[in-house]
Image (tube, rainbow, N blue to C red):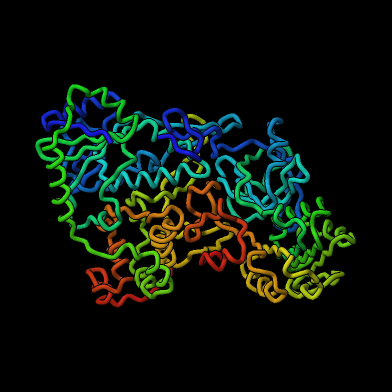
């Protein structure tokens, strides 16, 4: 029987797959440099010239890609670049396991393989006209940089923008110089803090990231708050959002899980019945209240 | 639906005729249980209850190569055979329908679809044993998801045609089937009544979503976590379990890298562990709870029906008797069965992971 709204089928009623979602695309490392002691920045370009522009413009901030190397496995990484600056994909990768150790051995011009982009990403269109409040902790700056740069590239479409970023020490801060330069801009507010400063040279705030909320001045009902950081951080930051009066469904967070497919099949990222790879990784505070064990 | 009649003496020629479609697989005896095997139809056991491993193995094999890597290029790899699979009971076909919904949603899975396209599914009716509970999960009869379905009425079979592919395949055996009469229909109605009366398990499974939600923090999970071996048997034998893992394997003979996909289980400790060692479900009780809430609650809100089809495989397979029935009974606070009696008599300390 032919059904309305069915997936694309052939005449026998069998679903047709045009592109194998498991097949990785080859890319080349254009540039790499260390952001901190154990986090490295990779700029990569899809090798197939026909795909470069379509792939790097048709994604949303907050989406991730499955990055792989033959015999080292495959893992999800947030895209830290923005679709408003197409041509390249950027990733911040921390050396923690088998795959990332192999990635750290690569030189510029070496190949890596990508699938994606996957995940829901941030609903940037729904944020138009609203004040934005970003709170990042540690490596959480990687996915948030994508949406922050997007908002700054289309600055006129958004209200006030606040960016609060906390790291353990000045040496652990990702994109330190980039954010230093951003502090000089007068069209948005960027506040940086470190938990401790062994160098004694840190010119800005010292303390946990929530201590930066004293600078925040937004129209609560008309604000979208976005948080990403280590698991322990969420509760404290969310409490601050609620204190300001931001509604639950305006509070977004992007979460980490183990993933092997990225397309809602392998099950390893499942939380209750939600697959983080397709129903996330961006969730609202309402989702967190509704779906147990999400954070 | 179109229905025909097949005389019992014509069963073997019927199966041999269908085998022109592809390799013939059906339930054969292995020890005191059954498995799907590629054997001549004379060996098929028509009153086989559940097989050890469900028919999902034909659509998502225990281990398969999905991609091959050579000369800096990944290529798709398919290992598809034309097969006729005989002997799937209504519960098995319902489970395949769950598989179908799951593997064709969002990003349709090309490997599943190739296997499915090349398989002729020939269902077979069954009479329940003491561990069957498909009457509680609403999966005791089946209307779609098969190509042909045989109802065993003793001296004859009713042959239901469920798909264009099934209809096409009947051309291979058109001399063996005949039209049904009123007498056959009467016999079928009688047979259904008899089958209905044979179920032994009685339990309120319909209320499970609420019951499980209310009992999310129940100490029962902790107790079961103590007994659970994290062996993964429940997920391997469950016909609606879909999870898999992916790993690369170097093939020294062909100088190729194979990307393998193999069955995986949410009760394994590494299931929710991310790089760096953080585990989102460290305790065994949390992993068990995930399995049951996903099957009986989560799946319900996503697809409108639970992912349990009442086949009873977890009931006969779990070495420590943790299964849908014991869990549901415990949550419903019904009188304790063997598992809970044993739990009460042993003084095992509650331990994690």
State which quarter of the image contains the C terminus of chain A.
bottom right
The correct choice, above or below, for B274 with respect to B286 in the image is above
Which quadrant of the view contains residue B144? top left
* Residue B154, placed above or below residue B177: below
Q: For the point 70% across and 37% down, which residue is it? A: A54
Which residue reaches farthest front?
B182
Which image quarter holds the N terminus of chain A? top left
Taking B329 as reference, is B243 above or below it? above
Number of numbered discs = 0
- Which residue lies at the image location 67% right of the left edge and 37% below the top edge? A27
Task: Compare residues B21 and B229 and report the one nearer the observer.
Answer: B21
Nearer the observer, B34 or B278:
B34
Q: Is residue A254 above or below residue B63?
A: below
Quadrant in the rendering for residue A199 = bottom right
Q: Is residue B250 visible?
A: no
Q: Position of residue A128 (x, y in %)?
A: 75, 56
Q: Residue B168 location, x and y as percent?
A: 31, 25
**Residue at 38% in and 54% down:** B305
Residue B64 visible from this viewpoint: yes
x 23%, y 70%: residue: B337
Q: Is residue B116 left or right of residue B4?
A: right
Q: Give residue B78's position: percent from left, percent from top.
A: 45, 31
């Amino acid at each position: 029987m032919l059904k309305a709204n069915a997936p694309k089928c052939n005449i026998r009623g069998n679903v047709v797959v045009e592109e194998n979602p498991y097949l990785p695309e080859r890319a080349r490392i254009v540039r790499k440099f260390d952001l901190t002691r154990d986090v490295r920045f990779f700029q990569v370009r899809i090798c197939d010239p026909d795909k470069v522009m379509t792939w790097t413009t048709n994604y949303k901030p907050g989406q991730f890609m499955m990055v792989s190397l033959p015999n080292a496995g495959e893992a999800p990484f947030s895209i830290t670049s923005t679709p408003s600056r197409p041509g390249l994909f950027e990733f911040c990768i921390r050396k923690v396991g088998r795959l990332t150790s192999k990635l750290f051995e690569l030189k510029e011009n070496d190949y890596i393989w990508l699938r994606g982009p996957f995940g829901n990403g941030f609903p940037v269109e729904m944020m138009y006209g609203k004040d934005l409040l970003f709170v990042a902790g540690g490596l959480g700056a990687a996915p948030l940089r994508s949406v922050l740069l997007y908002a700054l590239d289309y600055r006129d479409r958004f209200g006030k923008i606040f960016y609060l970023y906390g790291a353990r020490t000045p040496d652990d801060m990702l994109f330190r110089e980039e954010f230093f330069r951003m502090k000089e801009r007068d069209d948005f507010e960027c506040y940086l803090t470190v938990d401790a400063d062994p160098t004694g040279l840190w010119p800005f705030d010292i303390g946990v990231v929530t201590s930066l909320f004293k600078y925040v001045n937004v129209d609560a009902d008309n604000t979208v708050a976005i948080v990403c950081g280590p698991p322990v951080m969420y509760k404290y930051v969310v409490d601050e959002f609620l204190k300001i009066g931001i509604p639950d469904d305006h509070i977004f967070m992007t979460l980490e899980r183990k993933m092997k497919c990225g397309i809602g099949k392998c099950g390893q990222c499942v939380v209750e019945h939600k697959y983080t790879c397709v129903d996330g990784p961006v969730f609202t505070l309402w989702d967190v209240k509704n779906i147990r064990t999400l954070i | 639906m179109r229905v025909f009649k097949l005389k019992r003496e014509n069963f073997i020629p019927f199966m041999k005729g269908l085998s022109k479609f592809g390799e013939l697989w059906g339930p054969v005896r292995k020890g005191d249980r059954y498995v799907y095997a590629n054997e001549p139809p004379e060996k098929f056991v028509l009153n086989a209850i559940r097989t050890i491993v469900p028919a999902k193995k034909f659509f998502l094999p225990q281990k398969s190569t999905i991609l091959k890597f050579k000369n800096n290029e990944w290529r798709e790899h398919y290992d598809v055979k034309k097969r006729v699979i005989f002997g799937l009971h209504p519960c098995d076909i319902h489970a395949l329908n769950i598989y179908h919904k799951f593997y064709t949603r969002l990003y349709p899975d090309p490997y599943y679809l190739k296997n499915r396209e090349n398989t002729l599914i020939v269902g077979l009716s069954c009479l329940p044993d003491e561990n069957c509970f498909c009457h509680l999960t609403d999966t005791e009869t089946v209307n779609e998801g098969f190509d042909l379905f045989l109802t065993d009425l003793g001296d004859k079979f009713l042959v239901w045609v469920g798909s264009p592919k099934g209809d096409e395949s009947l051309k291979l055996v058109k001399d063996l089937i005949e039209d049904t009469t009123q007498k056959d229909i009467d016999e079928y109605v009688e047979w259904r009544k008899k089958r209905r009366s044979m179920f032994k398990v009685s339990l309120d499974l319909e209320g499970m979503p609420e019951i499980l939600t209310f009992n999310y923090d129940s100490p029962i999970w902790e107790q079961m976590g103590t007994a659970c071996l994290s062996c993964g048997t429940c997920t391997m034998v469950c016909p609606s379990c879909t999870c898999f893992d992916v790993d690369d394997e170097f093939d020294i003979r062909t100088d190729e890298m194979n990307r393998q996909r193999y069955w995986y289980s949410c009760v394994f400790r590494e299931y929710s562990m991310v790089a760096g060692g953080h585990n989102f479900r460290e305790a065994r009780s949390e992993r068990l709870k995930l399995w049951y809430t996903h099957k009986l609650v989560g799946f319900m809100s996503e697809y409108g029906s639970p992912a349990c089809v009442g086949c009873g495989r977890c009931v006969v397979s779990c070495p420590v008797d943790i299964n849908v029935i014991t869990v549901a009974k415990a949550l419903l606070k019904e009188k304790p069965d063997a598992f809970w009696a044993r739990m009460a008599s042993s003084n095992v300390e509650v331990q994690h992971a």
